C-alpha cells in the first residue's frame, strides 16, 4: 500500500505539472495509471477529485485569462450531448474509437483556414462541447479531443490553459457525481483512502503551481508548437494501437 500511495502521489504531482504547462495530457496519463492499479470505481472517483483540484486551481491561477464566451458555447454542447444520449444506446468498439481519436488531430491540422476547428467560433464551440462529452460518455475518453479545438486559435497560451481548465472541471465534476454515487451505493470501501486522497490532491496543487511558473516563462509560439507536436504524437500512438488491434 505504501508503494502504491507513493506512485499515485508522484503521478498526481507530475501530471498536474504537465497539464499546468500545456493544458493537456496529464489527465489521460493519470487515468491510465490509476485504472491499472485500482478498482475502476475508486480510480474514477480519485481521478475526478485529483483532476478537479488540478484544473480548478489552474483556472484560479489564470482566472484573468478565462474566455467565458467559449465556456458558454461548450456548456451548450455539453447539455445537448447529455440530452441526446439519454435516448441512445450505442457502444462503439475500442478499435474504432482509438482510430478516430488518433486521426482527428491530423484532420484538424490539415484543414484549410476557412474550415479550421476554432473553438472561439460559437458553432464550433457548441460542436466541440457536444462531441467531447459524447465521446467521453460512449468511449470513456474526451479530454484529448478537446485539445484539437484549441490548436489553431487566436488566443494566448494563458487563455488556452485557463479556458480548458474550466471546461475540464465541468467534466470531472460530472464524473465525481456519477461514480461517487455508484461507489457510495455499493460500498464505502470503493472510495479512495482519505489520506491517499488528501496527499494526491495536495500534490496536484503543488504540481500545478510549479507548472504555472514554466508557463509564465514560455512564449506563445513555443507553446502552440509543442502542444501541436504532443497532440500529433499522441495521435500517432493511438493510430498504431488501433492498427495493432486490427491485425491481432
Image (tube, rainbow, N blue to C red):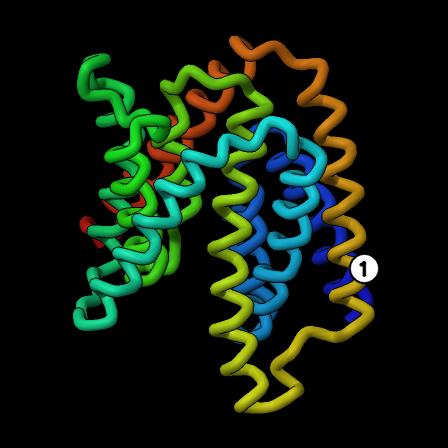
Q: Which residue is mark 1?
A: 199
Circle 1 Cα neighbour tier, 10 Å, few/some/many (<14 / 14–19 / ≥20): some
In the rendered structure, the answer to whether residue 81 lies left or right of residue 209 reads: left
Question: Where residue 155 appears, x then y in whole percent?
Answer: 47, 18
Q: Nearer the viewer, residue 113 or 60?
A: 60
> As displayed, is residue 17 above or below residue 196?
above
Question: Where residue 174 appears, x then y in whole percent?
Answer: 48, 64
In the rendered structure, the answer to whether residue 55 lies left or right of residue 104 reads: right
Asked which quadrant contains residue 165, the reply is top right
In the rendered structure, the answer to whether residue 69 lies left or right of residue 126 reads: right
Question: Where residue 45 appears, x then y in whole percent?
Answer: 58, 69
Q: Nearer the viewer, residue 98 or 146?
A: 146
Residue shown at 56% from the left, 76% from the top: 180
Residue shown at 61% from the left, 82% from the top: 190
Q: Nearer the viewer, residue 68 or 169?
A: 68
Examine the rendering and report whether any part of residue 146 can be seen. Answer: yes
Asked which quadrant contains residue 3, the reply is bottom right
Residue furthest to the bottom in view is 186
Q: Nearer the viewer, residue 99 or 89?
A: 89
Residue shown at 38% from the left, 59% from the top: 140
Amino acid at each position: 500500500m505504501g508503494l502504491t500511495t507513493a506512485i499515485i502521489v508522484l503521478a498526481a504531482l507530475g501530471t498536474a505539472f504537465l497539464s499546468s504547462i500545456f493544458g493537456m495530457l496529464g489527465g489521460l496519463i493519470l487515468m491510465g495509471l490509476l485504472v491499472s492499479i485500482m478498482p475502476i470505481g475508486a480510480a474514477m472517483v480519485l481521478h475526478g477529485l485529483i483532476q478537479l483540484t488540478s484544473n480548478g486551481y489552474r483556472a484560479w491561477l489564470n482566472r484573468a485569462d478565462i474566455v467565458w464566451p467559449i465556456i458558454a458555447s461548450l456548456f451548450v454542447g455539453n447539455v445537448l450531448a447529455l440530452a441526446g444520449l439519454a435516448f441512445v444506446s450505442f457502444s462503439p468498439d475500442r478499435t474504432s474509437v482509438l482510430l478516430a481519436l488518433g486521426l482527428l488531430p491530423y484532420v484538424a491540422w490539415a484543414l484549410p483556414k476557412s474550415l479550421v476547428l476554432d473553438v472561439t467560433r460559437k458553432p464550433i464551440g457548441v460542436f466541440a462541447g457536444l462531441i467531447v462529452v459524447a465521446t467521453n460518455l460512449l468511449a470513456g475518453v474526451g479530454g484529448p479531443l478537446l485539445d484539437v479545438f484549441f490548436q489553431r486559435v487566436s488566443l494566448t497560451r494563458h487563455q488556452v490553459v485557463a479556458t480548458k481548465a474550466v471546461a475540464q472541471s465541468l467534466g470531472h465534476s460530472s464524473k465525481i457525481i456519477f461514480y461517487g454515487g455508484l461507489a457510495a451505493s455499493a460500498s464505502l470501501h470503493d472510495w479512495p483512502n482519505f489520506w491517499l486522497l488528501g496527499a494526491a490532491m495536495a500534490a496536484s496543487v503543488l504540481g500545478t503551481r510549479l507548472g504555472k511558473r514554466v508557463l509564465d516563462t514560455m512564449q506563445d509560439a513555443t507553446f502552440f508548437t509543442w502542444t501541436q507536436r504532443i497532440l500529433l504524437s499522441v495521435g500517432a500512438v493511438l493510430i498504431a494501437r488501433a492498427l495493432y488491434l486490427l491485425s491481432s
